[in-house]
Structure formats: C-alpha cells, structure tokens
Image (spheres, rainbow, N blue to C red):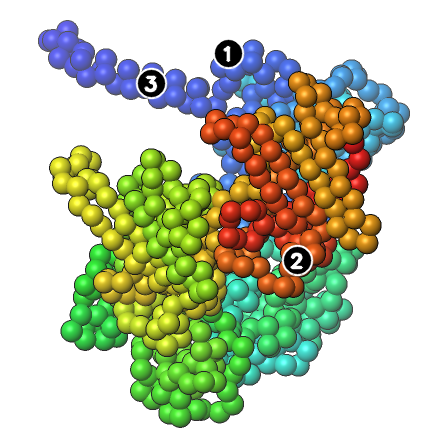
Amino acid sequence: MRRTGIARYRTTLGLAGLVLGGAAFIWFDRYSATTDELEARRQNVFRAFHRDRVSRIEVEHSSGRFELVRERDAWFVVSNGQRRPADLLEAERLLSEIEGAESQRALGDLDATSRQRFGLERPRAKVVVHEGNEVTARFSLGGAVEQEDAVYVEASAATGNRDARARALVLPKSFGQPFDRAAVEFRDRRIAEVDVDRLERIEFTVAAGRRVLERRGAVWTMTTPSLGRASRSAVETVTAELRDFRATRVLADDVDAAALRLHGLDAPSLRVEVRRASGAEPIVLRVGAACPGHDDEYTAVREGTGTLVCVGRSFADGFRAPPEGFRDDHVLSARTDEVSEVRVKGAGTAGADLVLRRDGSAWRADNSPNTVDAEAIEAWLTALHDLSTPARLEGDLRAAHGLAPAQIVIEVKRTGVEGVERVLVGALDAQGLYVSRDDEPLVMQFAPSAAETLRVEPVRFRPRTVLEETDDQLRAMVIDAAPLHEEIARLDGTLRLTRPVEIVADPSLTSDLAHGIATLTADRWVSSTLQPQFGLAAPRARVVARFEGALANADGGADGAAPVRSYTLAFGASAPGGGVYATLEGQSGVFVVPRSLYEQASAAHLDRGALRIARESVTRFTLTLGGATPSRIALVKTGDDWRTEAGTTADGARVDALLSQLASVTAVRVFGYGPPTPAMRFATPTMVLEFAGAGDAGQQSLRIVVGDRFGSGEGAGFYARRDGLDATLSLPESLVETLQQYRP
C-alpha cells in the first residue's frame, strides 16, 4: 500500500520539484552575475553590479550620512529622518559611474602611512550599494592623485556570495565627483509641476508693482494694470519657465526665517502666485538676492516648503518686463498652424455664416459658392495674425465707430484650446478702419488699407489659379498702358510687334508676359465687387490676349476643338502689402497679381537688341563725333584687313573688339515710340554711327544717331535712335565713352 501511495503522488511531487528548482534558478540568476557577464566585465571594478537591480545606495559623507532609495521608477533621498524626492538624473549618474568604473592601476596592500597619505584613512565619502539583501559595490573615496586627473579609491564588492577583499585603486577623477556631495545636492530640483494649459491666473509683484494676468477663454488678459489682451509671446515667456520649473541647485532644506531674511526672501524682489483652473491651492514662488557664488542666478523658495534653491536669471527676467511689454496690439493671437476653425458671421451664401474648417492638411468651407484654396486661407490667417494697430483710442468708443454691434464678426478656434477669439470689425472712414477684440472696450484704429484683410468675403479663399492656357497657343496681344499702345502677333512662330512699328518683339520681356497671362495666378483674391480704392474704373493698363488651339480636357488629352479664346486683363492701383489689383473682364472678383506682371505689361515690348549690328557682314564703318571738336573716322574692310579712307592700316584687333560690343549691345531702356523730344538733343547729336555691308538680302546699311546723356551713376546712358525705326532707345554710357575715345 505504501508503494501505491507514493506512486499516487509521484507526478505531483515531480511538478513541485520543478517549481522549486525554477524558483532557485530565478533567484540565482537575479542576484548573481553569470560567467559571461563576469568575463565581459573583467576590466570593471564592480563585476557583480547590476544597475537595474539596485535598491539602495548608502553614502557616508563629511557633511553627514544619507541614503538614496529606489521605489519602482522613482528615487528618494533619506536624510535626518526626512524622505524627499531625488533627482532621477543624478541617481542614474551615480549608477553609470559604478557600472563603468575601470581601474587605471592597482596599488596593492597599503600600510598605515600610505593609507594616510592617500586619504583613505579618513575618506571623503564611503558608499555601499545594495541590490536587495546583497551588497554589490562598496568603496571609499580618498584624495586626489598628484599631477593626475585621478582619485584614490578603496573598493570591494560581492562576487557571487563572497565579499571580495578590499583593494586600493586609482580611478578617474570623474568617478569620485558625483559621490563627494551633500544630500541636498541629490534632491529633485523640480520646484513645481505646472500644467500651463490649465492656468487661469498669474499674479506677480515686481518692485512693489502688482500685475495680474487672467485667462479668458482662448486668450490671456492683463487686468492689473488694465491693458486688455496680453501679448501671447510675453505670456509664453513666463509660462514656459513655469511649465517645468526646476532649480539650478538646491541650497538647503527646512530653512528658518533668518535664512530667508539673509537671502532677501522675507521681502522678495519678485513674488509669483499661480492659480490653476482645477481649484487647487495656488503655487507661490518668492525670488530674492543673487545666489551665493552664482551671480547669474537668484535664490528662491516655494512658500510652504522651506527648501531654499537657486533659479536661473531668465525666470525672473520674463516677469520683470514693464507692463507695456505685456500689451498686445495684434488683432489675432492664434498662429496659423493652430487654427482649427474660422467663422465669419453672415458672410456666407444667403447670409449664412461662412465657416472654414481645417481637415488635415486641407480646408473645407460651409456656405461658400466656391471651392477653397488651403494656401489662400493660410496666407489670410498669417496676414490677420501679423496685423498690429498703430493707434489705440482712449475710452470706450465702440458705438461711435460701428462696433456696437460690429459690422463683421470673425471667430477663431484653436486646436486643443477651449473658447474662441473674436475679432470685431467696425466702420471704415477716411481716417481708418476700427476694430475691437473679444469683449474689450478698447478700439483699435488701423489704416484704411487694413480693410482688405479684415473685411472678409468668400471670394477671398477661391483657388488662386485664374487661367490655365499654354504659352505656344498665344496668337496675339493688344496692350494699352497710356501713352503706350502696342499690338503683337505670332508670325511664323515668332512674336512680333505689328503696331506702332513692325519689328521683332523683345524675346525675354514678351515671353515672360505671355507666360504670366497664360498661367495667370492671383497672389490673393480681395473682393467680389469693384471698389474705388482698387483703381479699376480707369485701369492703368489693359492687355487683351487671344489664344487658339485645342483645349486640354480633364483626362489630359485634347477635346478635338480649336476654339478662339480671348481674355482682357485690367491692372488697377497698387495693393497694400505689394502687388497690383487686377480683374479679368467677364469674370467676377478682384484679385492681386505680382507687380512684375504689371511692369511686363506696361513696358514697351520693342526688341532691346534693335541697335545691334550684324558684325560679320560689316565692310564699312563710319564714326562721326559732334561736340566742341567734331571729328570723323571712316574704316573700310579689304579682305581681312581694316584701313582708313586714306589707306592707313588700322589695328584689326581693336576694330573687331569694338564691333563685338556693337553686335551684342542691349538697350537698357526704351523711351517710347514716335518723334524724340528736343531735350534728347538729336538735332546736335553726340555722335553718328554708320555701317554698311553685304547681307543675305544684298547691300545693307544701318545708321544710329546718339543724342544727349541721361541719368547719373549706374543709371546713366545716352538716347539713341536707328534710321527706319520710329522709337527712342538707349546705349550704355560705357559704350559711348569707348566710341568717343576710339582711334584706329
């Protein structure tokens, strides 16, 4: 029967044995270094040390005895019967030094004299490291090694279950520094944990001046002194310091009134009281005199703690800004990338609210007749944010300036922030546009041009592409920019002027204009209707462009038709902030185009190379100089040589260099078509250039008359005209001077 009983429980006993064996292995593995670990750490002083298993570090320092105790992921300093949070980084620094400690050399057995000389008889610190019930590091810090960046250490450690014999070693100086400190230097330096997103009030006193910031919805307001909405950047300067408020160093715990008085904390130079929306007790901070030995820091204390610390100067500097430094003169506090929704009251279709909502990287609109362009919305938000008033009106003048009620209300929501910002837009008169914010009585006066940003219409957010044509389908343009009238046509693949003169149009200028119109893109849309300030009732310039050819369909192919499409682009006044107002006749809406497009349209399109000579065909060159001492030079090419009319050989290289300049000359300016003015002095010219030669069309000649000098400095030049071309151009001053000084 006994055998039967044992057999009956054999399986159970076997399983119990396995469990006990496994537990023993886990215990051994946890508290013993493996052979592989010991081999890997052969150079380490503390070979059985496991930093993740350390539970307690005892330190006996000249300043007193204390312990660092780990509880889960936190560390605490235990000293004089008090347990306080420790700085996690400082605790990890100690573990790193122990884990990586490598001896520079071993000193062997030391006699009493050597121990005294090396500072090991009376060490600066004694450290014992515990891993549960095991000791895996034990060492004493001696003195510094002369003429070396090192320190004497006496160390021992548990290897397996045996306490190794103490050894005298030389270790790097960096090993000893973290341990040779008082308990207070291991204290957690966090003075307060403040969730700045849930603050509702910050009260601070500087130089006997009391100031109060209060959160109202999505914005901060300075209520004392009463300055209205506070500058977001100024508020963020102080809240950024509060977000993770840490001391630069902890000086002492449990300080008394005498110590506070010694450091100027009984009557602090700065007192900050922070109240949270949760209703928790306020956090009160006092800042006093300079930190001992650290002139760039101040002493500080959090009321109710008795812990004396030092803080960086930047903490106090933000609060010590003058009250005006907290004043916000901007219309909008929210930054573009934070905005989640914009609502413009009554601005949408049929008087509904126009609502713009961010949808990832795109935007969508409610109650708008148009699709919206994300870039246009964000450009407007940036302009709204950057708009700052040059003037604040005294008193509550909202009713007098169309703000009670407002003519336009813009509401802006920020991601993750409760409440909205309200921009209230009032009347517009000759002196300006009037605006207020939220429920403030303050009235801000802007220049009338600010209406372009603040008077919002759905058209503002239309896609900015106005035309989608191709350059090569442009067939003709008619340009009116008084007094300029030009007609340009594409003939044999080349854009040529047909009126008021017949000549090749300037390739660069004309192709830029053609491309700008074919791919017409608005910098921004501003209004659905014409208004006097746009200057479009009597445009400064107008371009009629005709395109011919098959239109591209939505699939990227041609639709098979060859329609003629004509567009009239009108340019008005200059727009505030750059660009020129424009409209496309037959389409609604006023938009702004780059000034460069207007300049391309309003400039004469005559070829800037119209005064160039065909160098290879020139066989005769005559230069007649006017002025006080008139002269004439005539050169004739015979074979490869150049000679004067008298038969004297001329310097061929100099003649070729001069003709090369004339073959590549570009007129910087075109002064217009028709006869020159008397002031240009073509009746008594500065010089006359005459060229003759044989070309593809037979004998050819070219005569250029150079008039008076114009301009000064880099803008100087000479008026010039070419026979057979009723237009006045220019020659560079440097070229004319070269011609005046030329001698064959």
Tell me the crowding category of disc 3: few under 14, some 14 to 19, or many 20 or more residues within 10 angstroms, Cα based.
few
Callout in the foreground (3, 2): 2
Q: Residue at x 18, y 70 (%)?
A: 349
Mark found first going from the N terminus, 1 or 3 = 3
Q: Is residue 367 visible?
A: yes
Residue that mark 2 sits on: 683
CA gap, disc 2 and disc 1:
105 Å
Please, is residue 74 above or below residue 201 in the view? Answer: above
Q: CA distance from mark 3 to mark 2?
A: 116 Å
Circle nearer the N terminus (3, 2)? 3
Q: Position of residue 53 (x, y in %)?
A: 49, 30
Which residue lies under the disc numbered 3? 22
Residue type (three-letter) at the residue carrying disc 2: Ala
What's the CA distance linking mark 1 and mark 3?
Answer: 20 Å
- Of circles 1 and 3, which is in front? 1
Amino acid under disc 3:
Gly
- The picture places residue 326, in percent across and down from the top left corner, at 56, 73
Labelled disc at residue 321: none
Residue 308, percent from left and from top: 66, 61
Q: Check disc 1 and report the residue beneath it.
A: 36
SS for callout 1: helix
Residue 374 visible, this angle: no
Q: Secondary structure at mark 2?
A: loop
Res 366 quadrant in image = bottom left
With respect to residue 385, does 687 lie above or below? above
Q: Residue at x 31, y 82 (%)?
A: 407
Q: Residue furthest front?
A: 646
Residue at 71% x, 31% y is 635
Q: Hey, which residue is sitting farthest top in the picture? A: 3
Say what amino acid the circle numbered 1 marks: Asp
Residue at image x 52%, y 67%?
A: 235
| Quadrant the N terminus occupies | top left
